[in-house]
Amino acid sequence: MYTKTGSMKGIAARTFAAAVACSSLATVTQAEVTSDIVGYVKVGAYSAPSSYTGLPGGSDTLVSPPFTRQPEFSGKVASFAGNVITVAGTPAWTANKFVYAASTQPKTYYALIGSATAANPLEGRVYDITANGTNTLTVDLNGDSLTGLPADAKITVIPYWTLATLFPAANAGVSFTATTATNDLKTQVLVPDSSTVGTNLPYAASYYFFNGAWRKVGDAETVNHNDDVIIPEKYITVRNPVGTTTKSLVVMGNVPSGKLAVPLATAAAAKQDNPVTFLSPLDTTLNGLGLGPSNGFTATTSSRAIQDQLFVYDNSQVALDKVASKIYIHMNGAWRLVGDNPTVDHGTDAIKAGSGLVIRKAASGTGATAFWNQTH
């Protein structure tokens, strides 16, 4: 079974706020040159489309960066063997330049598989890079296989967001409140559980900023977790406890393009929650998500036997340990809101950019992973 959990060196979002800074950053390699659209957004709660309320105090805010970081290579696949991908051309990489090394190389990288001349069954898949040669990338398939990868498929190497790149120390007091005593934690960044079977899952990790760096609850307060990564297709929760003030978070990065294949874990005989997000800096509708019976989401055929459910959360609601504000199912060819008249089509209901969602997959009978192929 393939489930993308990422390493726990292991984060938050909303719509193009003041503007989309459509500057063009060039990524130059010997393989090809690409021009990337860059934008910025204010991330967090909005009381109205143009009324940003930030990351409220005394509340949990479910968010995700709506951009990627700047890619550092874009080229094409030449061949593969097992979990080793050889790229076209001669990029002449230094050995293991894409491998994390504490204190000397703070970035953790992933390879994003793109389109090809022919149909590419792996388009949108994301794999952690564990090693590289001068023109090769060794990736963690995490149970997946590269079988079917076309020789001319696009491949992009991108560094993950990390705690320190999303919440740099310089932003203490702006995007988060630093902790001054470990018996009184201030802003916490909570990472949802992506590996436990079941529903209403606990958080897998909790972080707080103390003595100039991000620390992890349960770990020694001297251990630096600045480089822990944020998985691009999942949300994190920013918790500002009662007594902390509202903060403001602005995220700038590369506007995503192409496809992203978001894995949705299932259990054979039980329901399974998947914490996810839609990677886009723009609000969209339920119909615009592309999620549905032909794309990762099992339709309900009878209201007495609910299948997959989509949980949506309201960041403008000030509350800790939030419950979903709306639950949707897909039935009779359209999105229906649980609790509303089942004949009403809710496909035009808006989903805020960079917000956290939970897809609760019904028991699959096999435990096989489904994929939600997002198109940007």
Image (tube, rainbow, N blue to C red):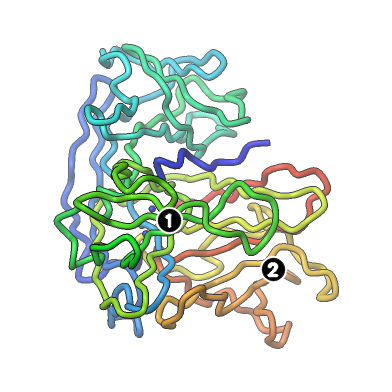
| Residue type at numbered disc 1 | Ser
At 32% across and 48% down in the image, what residue appears? 221
| x then y, percent, for residue 288 | 51, 64
| x then y, percent, for residue 93 | 27, 16
Residue 181: quarter of image? bottom left
Q: Is residue 163 above or below residue 45?
A: above
| x then y, percent, for residue 37 | 25, 49
At 60% across and 24% down in the image, what residue appears? 148
Q: Is residue 199 above or below residue 9?
A: below
Q: Is residue 336 left or right of residue 263?
A: right
Q: Residue under circle 1?
A: 206
At 51% across and 27% down in the image, what residue appears? 140
At 74% across and 58% down in the image, what residue appears? 271
Residue 19: quarter of image? bottom left
Depth order, front residue of 235/122? 235
| Residue type at numbered disc 2 | His
| x then y, percent, for residue 13 | 35, 63
Looking at the image, is mark 2 or mark 1 earlier in the sequence?
1
Residue at the bottom extreme of this rendering: 341
The kind of secondary structure element at disc 1 is strand
Depth order, front residue of 99/352? 99
Depth order, front residue of 105/217? 217
Q: Residue under circle 2?
A: 330
